[in-house]
Each structure stands twice: as C-alpha cells, then as structure tokens.
Image: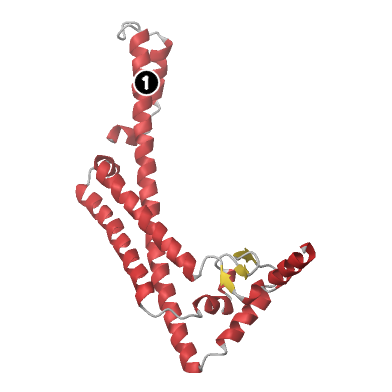
Amino acid sequence: MTDAMETKREKARLLRYKKPIITNLNLQSIYEELWNIQEECENVHWYCETDEDTLINALDGNEEEASEFKMMFSDLCAECEQMLCDLKEEWVPECFDKFFVAIGAGEYYGGLLGFDTYEQDYFGLACTDAFAEDESKKALKQLTKDNLIEAARQCFRIYESFMSLRYRYDCLKAAMDILKDENTGHLQMVKQIEEMYGKAEEESLGFQYEWCDTVAQLDRFLENLPQEAWLQ
C-alpha cells in the first residue's frame, strides 16, 4: 500500500509542469493582491480619519494636501473594487495563467509553480521549467489564430490594469511610510525631551541647581538637535 502511494506521489510530482502558473502573476495571485491593496487602503483611510492631526502635522500643516492624500487612497480602493468586479463579469481567457508561462514571464515574476494532483497544491518548479513552458505553448497552439490574438489582447489588458493599480499603491504606500516615519520620529523626540526635562526638573528642584547631571544631559541633547526640529 505504501509503495503504491509513493508511486502515485512520484508520478504526480513529475507531472507538475502540466498545469503551471507564474508565482506572482496568475489569476489567483491578482485577486489576492487586489484584496490586500483594498485592505491596506482602508487601513490608511482609518488611520487618517482617527488621527488626522498627525497626518496634517506630517505634511507641514497643509490641510488641502492631507485631504488630497486621503482621496488618492480612497480612489485606489474604489478602482481595486471595480477591477475585482470586472474580473468576475468580463471575459477572462481560460488560458490566462498558461499565457504568461508560455511567454517566459516566470523569469521576472518569481519563477514557476506546478500543480501536484496528489498533494492538491502548487509547488515550485526547478529543472522542469522548460517542460512547463513547452506544455503551455502546446495548449495555446490548440487555439485558432484569431482566438489566440483575442486571448492575448485580453490577457495584456488585465495585466496592464493590474500593474497600474499596483504601481500606484506602491508609490502611495512609500509616501505614507515616509510620512509616518517622519512623524513618529518627531513624536519620539518630543517624548524623549519631556522625559529628560521631567528628570532634570525633579533632580534640580525646579532648575535651582543647574550643575545636576540631568540638567547637563538635557542641555547637551537640546544643543545637538537638528535645525529642522525647531521648526516643527
């Protein structure tokens, strides 16, 4: 019984290249990434709504720019929702995953995965990559020339729309991360000053004795603050 199971397992492993997909460019991964972008956009919207002053402060008090920034995330969230709906309602070629395998996109999007019928899951392909591409090409050759052209056009439309949304998200997220980091750094600096000030005030009895170590430490810290810190 064990030998029979091992035989089935090995046979399934050798046939993984029959149903390959690109690791980071297949229909399921597109769905998942659109959902993730939506969720992240909603998180940013929540962050902006619950802590709007922090965002405005990070943008040097520019309320109009803060409002525009929030709107960008809101628009992106809506467009991801629209694309998810389009993928369910519009025609998506059955050969979508095979198409990108056949044209060698695995080299740029994380390699290839092959489906294991025994394990009912996808696993990475290594030495069988060429076989996977050949199998996908063979499947595409079954289409008429007109159908192949039409399918290729639709595959690239989906690809273009998805990459456009992902690029916009990457740019917006990078900007948001910078703003958060800058503001977090400022808040941490303010907190550190407050803590040092409190210790110095307590030890020097209301700064009556300026020779205290804590007062000297506070003075040195303030002297070494970057110039922009005084502009906040």
Task: Left or right? Give the position of 5 relative to 158.
Answer: right
Task: Point out residue 31 in the picture as x, y percentages from the top left corner.
Answer: 43, 65
**Horizontal relation, residue 139 to residue 188: left or right:** right
In this view, the residue farthest toward the right is 3
* Helix, strand or loop under label 1: helix
Residue 205 seen in the current view: yes
Task: Give the residue at x 31% y 68%.
Answer: 82
Residue drawn at point x = 52 percent, y = 90 percent: 143
Position of the N terminus by quadrant: bottom right
> Residue drawn 43% across and 11% down?
213
In the rendered structure, the answer to whether residue 111 lies left or right of residue 215 reads right
Residue lying at the far front in this picture: please name it. 1
User: How packed is label 1: few (under 14 Cα within 10 Å), some, or many (20 or more)?
Assistant: few
Vertically, is 40 above or below 84?
Answer: above
**Which quadrant is the C terminus positioned in?**
top left
Give the answer, above or below, for where 60 lies relative to 212: below
